[in-house]
Amino acid sequence: MDIKHAVKNKLSYSQETDNKALSVNTTNALSRASHGLSLNEKRLIAMSIGKIDSLKSGFRQHNGQQMRVKITAQEFSDMFSVSDKSVYRHLINACDNLMKRYVRIIEKTSKGRKEIKFSWVSGVIYHHGEGWVEIGFSNEITPHLTLIRGQYTSYKLNSATALRSVYSWRLFELFMSVSVIKNDLKGQLYITLEDFRHSLEVPDSYKFNDIKRRIIEPSCQEINNIHHIKTTWKPSKKGRSITSLLFYFDKESQQESAPSDEKDNLIAVKRCPDTMDMFG
């Protein structure tokens, strides 16, 4: 198809939606699950979730109707600064891959671990002649996106659009799931190393030094650079083995936020002019 025509063609749906104001709201169970997404797939899912805010509150599937969201090539390009020449191809590839992706949630029960898997989407419609796609969310994902009650994860989509690493985006979401102020980076995250590996889908071959060097430090650095915050963190041990991680994050001095008896053990992640782009 004519990519230039696809990008320039704007639908009334996208014109009625203020994409800069989109919020990504999910249950904490979903934000802490394993997502199995690449960067462009993550972008597409996050934008689609943000679009749900413009739908009728409390939408649920009725009479076999899917919860559908329209994404145009133009708005995807504008939101994530993707080249006009390749944006529709990226959109198609991301949609194709979403048909094979699934969410993986691990629950701990008295009888052992329970593993839950379900698809992100149930179908995609490609409007090739007009340059937009229509994404249908699966039945299983819908309760994690609508009528959310209690503790949940919420952030503005435009606060994550500059992230170039899936690891950074997933760590950012974990931060937001425990932030003391909704839509703002302030708080602390305590997470077991096992759960961290699960949520960020750390390769089994990675030892802790690999996790520190290839995931934690570059991800914290990228988040710091974009949001102008200071992050400190430390590993916790049980015996000689590292079993958990503790992160402090705030736009103020992190040393002031951390308990005084822990300051000496914290690892500061400083902002630098050039953000590492290891996983884009």
Image (spheres, grey):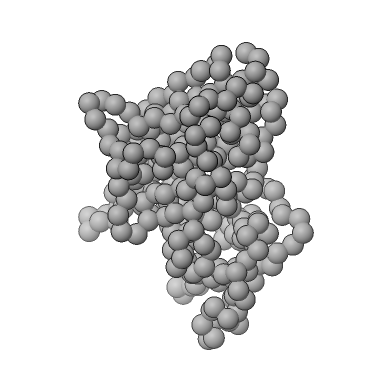
User: Which residue is farthest right?
Assistant: 273
The image position of residue 83, as x and y in percent, is: 70, 31
121 w.r.t. 214: above or below = above
Residue 74 image position (x, y, % from top left): 61, 29
- Height in image: 64 above or below 54? above
For residue 95, say whether it is visible: no
> Residue 122 vs residue 261: left or right?
left
Q: Nearer the viewer, residue 196 or 163?
A: 163
Residue 251, by quadrant, is bottom right
Q: Residue at the location (54% across, 41% down)?
A: 19
Residue 75 x, y percent position in the rendering = 58, 33
Residue name at image x 48 percent, y 29 percent: 13
Q: Quadrant of residue 209?
A: bottom right
Image quarter (top left, top right, bottom left or bottom right) of the N terminus: top right
Q: Residue at x 69, y 67 (%)?
A: 270
Q: Nearer the viewer, residue 157 or 32?
A: 157
Residue 146 position (above or below residue 246) = above
Position of the C terminus by quadrant? top right
Which percent across, then down, holds residue 200? 50, 51
**Point 65% across, 63% down: residue:** 228
Seen as rendered, the residue at the extreme bottom is 261
Residue 54 seen: yes
Most foreground residue, 32 or 62? 62
